[in-house]
Image: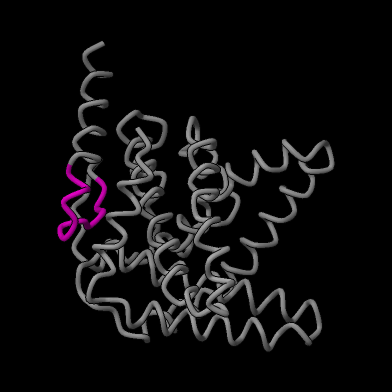
Amino acid sequence: MFNRAAYKNIAKKQLAGRWGTPILATIITLAISSALSATVPLVAFCALSVLCMANVYLYITLSHTKEKQPLSKFIQGFSFWLNGILGTLWFILWTTLWSCLFLIPGIVKSLAYSQMFFIIAESPDMDVRTAMNLSKKITQGHKMDLFIMALSFIGWLILSGFTFGILLLWLIPYMNMAEINAYHSIKQQALDNGIVTAEDFKTTQNTPSESSGTTTGSQYNWDTSNAEDAEPVQTAIQDNSENKENL
C-alpha cells in the first residue's frame, strides 16, 4: 500500500518540536544555491550535489530518531560529498539517456532512480550503481504513486510564490520528510515481499539507523513513535506480507 496522506501527516508530527535545524538547513541551502547562480556551472553542479546529500542525510537521521538534531548533523552530511556528486552524475546520465528515447521513459526512470539518494544516505559506502539498482527494485509498483505524491505539493509551491519564498522554509522540510516516509514504507514493503533483503543494504559504515539502535532482521527501523498515523500504515504492510506468506 502507498498512503501519501499518512506520510504527510507523519512528517508534520515528526517535525513537531524539531523544525529548527531543518529550517536552518533550508536557509543555508537556498542562500548557497542563490549565490552559485553566477558561478562556473561545474562548480555549481558539484556544490548543489553535496548540498543535496547533506540535506538527505539530515532528514534520514530525523526519520530514524525522535530527538532534536543539531545543525552539525546537516554539516556531517557534507563528508559524503563524493556520494552526492557521483550519485547525481549517475542519476542525470541514465535519466538523460532514457529521455533521448522519449519524454515518458525519462520520467518513469527518474522515478525508478529517485530513492537512490536515500539509500546512499543510509549506506554511505555503497556504490551508486548498487544504490540505483536497489532503488529500481523498491519502486516497483510505486512509480505512479511517487509521481502523484510529487504533484500533490504543487499547490503549496505556487502559494509560496505569494509569500516571496518565505513559506519554502517550512514547505521544503515538510516535503523532504514526507518523501522519506514514503521511502521507508516502500522499502519495508520490498523487504517483506522478498524483492530485496536486509543483506542488500548492509555496508561497513554505521548508518543513522544503526547509530540510533536499530534491531537487525526484516523489520526496518522507521521511527514514528511520535506519530500515531504510522500505526495503520505499518499494520497494513505487515498484514499484506502475512497474506502473501499464506498464499
Q: Nearer the viewer, residue 215 or 21?
A: 21
Q: Percent x, y for residue 100? A: 84, 42
Instruction: Report the magenta residues as a range.
Output: 220-231
Residue 134 visible at all: no
For the residue pair 4 and 114, the one nearer the viewer reads as 4
Residue 12, picture quadrant? bottom left
188 sits to left or right of 117: left
In the depicted structure, whether residue 21 falls above or below residue 106: below
User: In the image, what residue occupies the spot 29% across and 79% down?
Assistant: 69
**In what quadrant of the picture does the N terminus appear?**
top left
What's the residue at 45%, 55% (across, down)? 119
The residue depicted at 58 percent of the width and 42 percent of the height is 112
Give the percent coordinates (x, y) of residue 217: 22, 43
**Percent x, y for residue 153?**
50, 55
Q: Is residue 23 above or below residue 61?
A: below
Closer to the camera, 140 or 37? 37
**Vertical order, 153 against 14 (above or below):** above
What secondary structure is the stretch in magenta mostly built from?
Answer: loop
Side of 86 relative to 5 (left or right): right
Residue 223 among those drawn in magenta = yes
User: Who's the residue at 55% across and 48% down the image?
Assistant: 151
- Colour scheme shown: one colour
Left or right of 198 in this view: 45: right
**Rendering coords of residue 41 (x, y %):** 80, 77
Quadrant that contains the C terminus: top left
